[in-house]
Image (cartoon, helix red, strand yellow):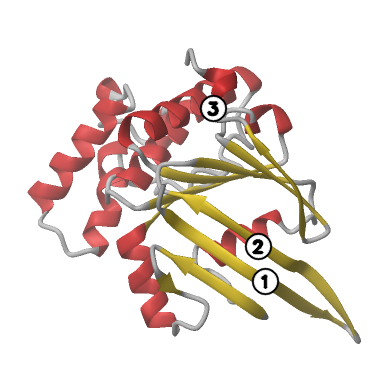
Amino acid sequence: MRKIIEVKNLYKLYRVGDSAVRALDGVDFAIYEGEFCAIVGTSGSGKSTLLNMLAGLEKPTKGEIIIDGQHIEGLKEDALVKFRRENVGFIFQSFHLIGTMNALENVALPLNFRGEARDSRLKKADKMLDLMKLTKHKKHMPNQMSGGQQQRVGVARALVTDPKIVFADEPTGNLDSHTSEDVMRLMRKIVEEQKRTLVMVTHDNHLAQYADRVFHIIDGKIVKIENLGGKNHENY
């Protein structure tokens, strides 16, 4: 299998007054193409900082981040914006849908930033919403949809640009347990059927069991990597 993410000796230090806090403390790992990996830890463990580093949203204090063969740790902001636009999809905890746009328009929005023609981007968004089983909700505004439906719109938006990697930050954090399971089964299915690489941050050990591998992070260190192979949810 081909490495699509490689992290080498990664550190992130924050200054708090006169002291330094190590949010990441010498992290090393690789993630392979088509793999679903979950990064699990409590609040303050460093998991969200790590996700931000992988997505090019924050720079490390020290270390290397190699995405699909490209070092991103030293890229300038304009190059990072281009990198994210061309390679990355995001799924957020609080959906981040535009309230004045319907589901179809929200999903098409990332293609607009790429300068794609309106007809083309709406056609791709339409196809993605069908995939999410939201065919009847395409013209609905966010406030006309349930939390689970809004998050499925968020997943469609993350996938519409055909990204190499999808990053999900606590994607079920605002959903009830039943809806959370539905969203996780959907994400597992996408990984399996579309061979996507998905990296998810969560505090929930149970939901992490949908992943192929689980990275446990404590005090900025990866302390254990579980190899599940998606076996716990083969019958999604």
Answer left or right for 14 relative to 35.
Answer: right
Which residue corresponds to the image point at 37% horizontal and 79% vertical from the top-left?
79
Side (left or right) of 224 relative to 35: right
Distance in Å between CA atoms under marks 1 and 2: 5 Å
Q: Three-letter amino acid code at disc 3?
A: Gly
Q: Is residue 164 above or below residue 211?
A: below
Residue 1 percent coordinates (x, y): 41, 47
Residue drawn at point x = 55 percent, y = 56 percent: 30
Give the residue displayed 56% in from the left and 42% down from the top.
37
Q: CA distance from mark 3 to mark 1?
A: 28 Å
- Residue labelled with disc 2: 28
Residue type (three-letter) at the residue carrying disc 2 = Asp
CA separation, marks 2 and 3? Answer: 22 Å
Badge number at residue 230: 3
Q: Secondary structure at mark 3?
A: loop
Q: Earlier in the sequence, mark 1 or mark 2?
A: 1
Q: Which residue is mark 1?
A: 9
Categorize mark 3 by other alpha carbons within 10 Å: few (<14), some (14-19), many (20+). Answer: some
Percent x, y for residue 29?
61, 57
